[in-house]
Image: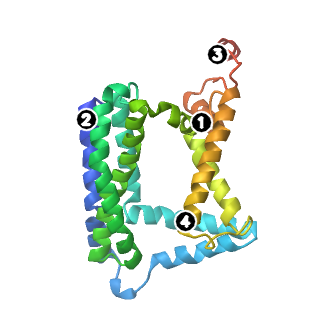
Amino acid sequence: MLCCPRPNVAVVTASVFALRVVWPVIVAALVRMIWPISSGTDPGGSFTALTRAFDSADPSAIFSANLALLQLKALQMIYDGRAVSILAMFLLGALIGKLGLYRDVARHRTLFRNVFWICLPLGVIGNAVLTPIHAATPDFPPTGMWMLENSLYAVAVPAMAVAYASGFAWLWSCGWRSMLRWTAPAGRMALTTYVSQTLIGVALFYGVGLGLRGRIGLVEGTVLAIGIFAAQCLVAGLWLRWFRFGPIEWVWRRATYGVPIAFLRNVSPKILRASA
């Protein structure tokens, strides 16, 4: 895909996004053909039951529940179209890379501004409508309201993500660089940041940790999330003073390229080539 011309990447990206919008209709039609709706079986019930194991203080019970959830989660991501959404966002990232928009943010300031003002209302209004629909709509069987919810998700959620990204790029190009620079290390260690958030969540919310699951409200959760991210930005900045990459980023690069890659900042690439 990375070797494809830009127009081809754009066409494929648009096609996958379009597929994601109509995906709920396709799934609903398939379910009606292969799953007897009258049976009343709800696959989501098993998912909910398994998540209760996270309140346990028994690590083996939590591990077993997570293994069982892998299959259910994979099926759920196909069922509700999240897997298609992930593919679409990967393709969008490939297109942005092809266009080189990240190389000279200031030169594309107008583009980022326009994209932000287009995607922001789509994201805010779409998610505001999506939230009550999601709360009132069962995941199974796929009803008309379920199809509406998931088609709306296909537009509102990516729009909000693009609004965030283009908004930060726009602010960066408008002289806010000094204020936003502190977040850059977490971006350079995005995979490590993401995985470490999972570990922090386990420590805070699982029964093997503080067991805060279900005991924190929306406001407290938002403040906690901001605090965790701020701490991660600080730690990432300190880490990158001595290391070239985050730990998981280094492993990913080493496995991808299959050649020695300098991890410490004071290691010369020439030394690595000589030892290869």
Q: Amino acid at mark 2?
A: Asn
| Residue that mark 4 sits on | 219
Q: Earlier in the sequence, mark 1 or mark 2?
A: 2
- Spatial distance from mark 3 to mark 2, Cα to Cα? 36 Å
Closer to the chain start, of discs 3 and 2, is: 2
What amino acid is labelled 3 in the image?
Pro
Estimate the x, y position of residue 187 in percent, counting from the top left: 53, 38
Quarter of the image containing the N terminus? top left
Residue at numbered disc 2: 8
- Give the residue pinned by disc 1: 249
Left or right, 174 with respect to 222, comes to left
Circle 1 Cα neighbour tier, 10 Å, few/some/many (<14 / 14–19 / ≥20)? some
> Which residue is at 63% across, 52% downward?
228
In space, the residues marked 1 and 2 are separated at their CA atoms by: 29 Å
The Cα atoms of the two marked residues, 1 and 3, are separated by: 17 Å
Tell me which amino acid carries mark 4. Val
For numbered disc 3, what is the local secondary structure? helix
User: Label 3 crowding class (10 Å Cα cut-off): few <14, some 14-19, many 20+?
Assistant: some
Mark 1–mark 4 Cα distance, whole angstroms, equals: 32 Å
